[in-house]
Each structure stands twice: as C-alpha cells, then as structure tokens.
Amino acid sequence: MNADNLSPRPLPFEPDPTTFNTGAMPAAQSHAATARSTIEQTATLPKVARVKSTPLLTRPDADLLIAPLQFASTTMPNLSAVRLRRRSRRYRWGKICLLLYDILFVTLAFYAAYFTRFNALQGVTFDGSTFFIKASLDNLAIFQIVLIVGMAVILIMRGMYRLRPTGSFTRQAAMFFVASTVCFAGFSIYEFFFRNTEFELVKDTRAIVVFSWLAAIIVPISGRLVLALLITLGHRLGIGRTRLLVIGSGRTGKLIMQHLAAAPGLGFRIIGFIGEDPAQGDFGRFKLLGMLADADRVIRAYRIGEVIIALPSAAERQLARAISVCERTGVTFRLVPDMNSLSLARVDLETVEGIPMFTLRRVAASRWQRVVKRLLDIAVAGIILLIGLPLWLLLALLIRLDSRGPVIFSQTRIGQGGRPFTSYKFRSMFVGSDTKRPDLAAENRAGRGLFKLKNDPRCTRIGRWLRRLSLDEIPQLWNVLRGDISLVGPRPPLPDEVAQYEEWEKRRLDVPPGLTGLWQVRGRSNITFDEMVLMDLYYAENWSLRLDGEILLKTLPVVIFRRGAY
C-alpha cells in the first residue's frame, strides 16, 4: 500500500488530528476514562494476561492510541525501541541490497571488460606484444574475485552506503572512480613484486587489467544512474515517498519546505509543519498541524517517517523538547542549523580539531556575469520578438476585435532599487477593471502583497486564453530589451504592494525583476506572497548564470502544460 495515499487515522477517543489545538475534548473523555480503567484493572495481571485482556493495545496502531492521552508512560520507550528496531532493520537491509546491486554491476563490468578485450578486440596486441593470447575466464577467476571484493570493501570504507541513492551523483561517481583506481594501483604494486611467480594473478595478458579498471568505473556509475532515475520516477509518481514533518515556522523551515516540495525526486512528501506562534496559520500550501506541544500526537497520527527540526538557535528549550519528542517516538530526525538571515547555500562547514566552523562565502555577481546576463537578455528577447512578429500582430488583432480598448495594457511597476518603470502586456481584461479590484478583494487567496483570482470575472474571452498560455507576457520582452527587467528574476511588484512590504522583504528589490523566476517554476499563481518573497530572497542571495539557465529550462514545461496559470 502506498503510504502517500493514506490519510491520517483519527484517534477513536479524540478529534481529528488537524484540530489538536481546539481546546477541550468532551466527546473523548468517556473513551479516555474507559481506556485508563482498562489499563488500571490489568496492571497487576501477568504480562500474557494483560495482552489478552487489552486487545486494543495489541493492534498495529497501538502507539497511536497511547500517546495522546499520555497514560502508561512506561510503555513509551518500548514502543520507541520497537520502531527504532524496525527502522534499523529496514535501513540495514536496504543498504545490503544496494551493496549487492553494486556488486552485480562490478561483476558485469568485469565481463564487459573481458568481452571487449578478447572478443571485440580479438587479435589486437598491446605493450609491444607480438602475439595475441586469449585468456580463459577460469584463469582470471581469482582476479575477478579480488576486484569485486576490493571495490566493495573500499566503497564501504568510503561511506558510499551512507549516501542516498538519489543524492549527489557526482559524489557517487567520484567514489567509484577512487575505488576502481585504488584496486588498479594495488594490483600494480602486487604485480611488481610477484610477477612471473606462482603467485601471479594475471598471466600472459595484462591489458584486461586496464579494461577492468575503466569498466569498473563506467558500468557501476551507469547502474547507479539508472537506479536513481527509477527511484526518482517512482517518487514523482508517489511511490515510496517519506512522510515528512518540519518543526519550525521561521525562514529556514519555510525554505526547507519550499525546496523539498520543488524536488519530489528526493522522495519526501511534506505533510505539514509545527509552528512556534499560536497566532500564525498555514504557510501557503503547507499546513500548520499544531504547536510544539502537539508534535508527539502529530507524528503518531500522521505516521510521520522523518522530521526536520529547523528551530531558531535562541529557542534552546524548544529545540531540546523537539529532539526528545523525536527520540521518544522513534522517528528519524535531522537538525538544520539556524544561520539567522544567511542563506545556507552560502555557508561552508569545516572541522578544526573536532570543532565545527562556518565560513560565509561572498556571492556578489562579478561584472562579466552581469554583462553575460544582459547580453543573453537582449539576444533571447530580440529573437522571440522578431521570429514571432506575425503571431503577435494576429494576437493584437484578436484582442482588438474581442473587446473595446487598447491592445497594450501599461502599468507602473517597481524595479531594481525601488525605481518605477512602465510595464507592458497584452490587455487581457475589460477596460476599467482596476476599479473593481476592491469589490473582489474577499476572493483573493494569495494573501497580502498579491492579488490573484482563479476565475477572474474581469478577464475577456481572448484574455483568459492569453493568460493560460502566458502569451499576455510577450510585450514585456520590450521591457527586457530596455533593461527595465531581465528574463529571470523576482516578480516586478506594484507600488501599492511595495507599500505593504516589511523592511526585510524589500531585499527582493536588490536584483532586477524578471519575466520568470523561481516563483514561476515552483507554483506560479498557486503560491502565496510569503512563499514568493522567500523564493525571491533565495534567488537574490544565490544568483548565478547556472541558476538562471535552470529556471529558463524549467519555465518551458510550466508554460506548455499551463501549470498554475490563470
């Protein structure tokens, strides 16, 4: 059964888990009293009799029934220990299967090397040899075993099986390269001492060693790539994803939720988060499941598989309590260091005599990067405008025929450094629609700082179609040519939106606004203002030409499949 399709199991003597903070639970008190009475009556019975007398507690979901009422607290460590043992057993068998998978591909690598050397290159000689000798597999059996065992041992020692299969592919490839090279070097040293003796591993032909070295790098890396692609595909289809809870509602916690939600291939399904302020609500698409006092019940009721703790460093008591809850429930948890307003992508960690030290990297764009970005803006915008000119003229004609008013809609927006500029779009609404905005404010679901309606009654027939295909944005390419905006950057806000900004939110105006950005490829109109601001700040602090390229490539499928467009 796919865990992602399971909904939270309501507790039989307490309300739905999403209402943990609703106060008293009168409907649950009689059930709670009955449960406590049952345990008190069976407390003095032998262990076997207790199990038989309380079938409620022997069910697979017994931990869900015990935790919320906090009775039989002596049972908690046992439940946690059982869960830890199960998780440890799954983890261990998973790593064993991964090791066997690598051994299989190292074996295939050896046979690939043998086939290449003695079949594909049959008759070809190396090292100045005058004749070709085809070695049998039996004569190379010991060499094959040494290669497989040697690589397995080196990979284990290098920590290969502590990495996620879908993690850094470069790091995994480097480990295979190191393992194969160390085996090759070790064999060379061995041959130097035992060549032409009875202890020689490879007789008459040594080219197979070089071929095995190359194959032991290429074939297992290819196998890992295929495995990562299959796992990622499964995760995107909702198979095998881990139910994740984030403890912390500060900037770090929100960034973590955004990044993990934008990368479903990592295998996490964000169930929600635990907040720090009772007055706060949901963070866009991410649901607030309760306060820290509710963490124990949330973890059990929602069957959380992993927890990420992202609390402020000043909240020492809350941090210790969160760790205690995770340990007590037996759930896997990770700690994210609180670097205040710093981007974690700008921080390097190094250890000096066991003491962790953080180094902050400067990521200010160099002059040549800004020049390249500007040249790309001009080139791409100019090409699109020129090549699509007949289509743009046709769209202008359709807009003119559909409703009265100008073809181009101009509006004042705020650019880099708070400088206003005039933005141009194909008109998609009826003339005078701005005056109706206050009447529709109650239907706005984007929160403060944004105004988005899924079914905006102000849109014309052709305008609704233009918006869904993002064709109403085409005239903004003229703004790109003028230098008002860039192809990639934060969304250019309206003056009244900027007036509502808090001081730290104005940092998104430090970089040029863009036609597309992280907000476009990670949700578009489906995200709230708070989410968009964090994405824009992340972009401003981590800007690079590579990031721009990734955003542009991801924009194409978003526009084609009309994700979040309305």
Image (cartoon, grey):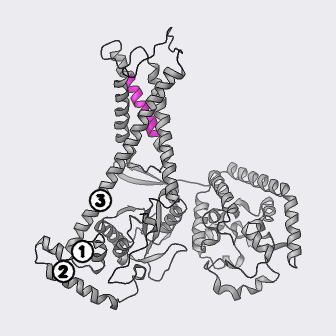
- What's under tag 1, amino acid-wise? Leu
Please report contact status of discs 2 and 1: CB closer than 8 Å, yes or no.
yes
Frontmost residue, 400 versus 59: 59
Query: Which residue carries the number 3 mark?
Result: 86
Q: Label 2: how many residues lie within 10 Å, few (<14), some (14-19) or many (20+)?
A: some
Q: Residue at x 87, y 78 (%)?
A: 405
Dominant SS type (magenta):
helix
- What's under tag 3, amino acid-wise? Arg
Please report contact status of discs 3 and 1: CB closer than 8 Å, yes or no.
no
**Could you tell me which secondary element the residue under label 1 belongs to?**
helix
Would you say 545 lies left or right of 142 here?
right
Mark positioned earlier in the residue sequence (3 or 1): 1
Q: Count every numbered label the image shows and give the total.
A: 3
* Spot occupied by residue 437 in the image (x, y as percentages of width and height): 72, 84
Q: Residue 39's mark? A: 2
In the image, the segment drawn in magenta is 174-187
**Could you tell me which secondary element the residue under label 3 belongs to?**
helix
Tell me the quarter of the image containing the N terminus. bottom left
- Mark 2–mark 3 Cα distance, whole angstroms, equals 26 Å
Frontmost residue, 22 versus 86: 86
* Spot occupied by residue 450 in the image (x, y as percentages of width and height): 65, 77
Q: Which marked residue is nearer to the observer: mark 3 or mark 1?
A: 1
User: Does the magenta segment cover residue 179?
Assistant: yes
Query: Which residue carries the number 1 mark?
Result: 57
* Spot occupied by residue 408 in the image (x, y as percentages of width and height): 84, 71
Frontmost residue, 448 versus 462: 462
Frontmost residue, 179 versus 207: 207
Would you say 313 lies left or right of 83 here?
right
Give the vertical position of 219 relative to 204 (above or below).
Answer: below
Give the vertical position of 469 relative to 234 (above or below).
Answer: below
The quarter of the picture where residue 157 lies is top left
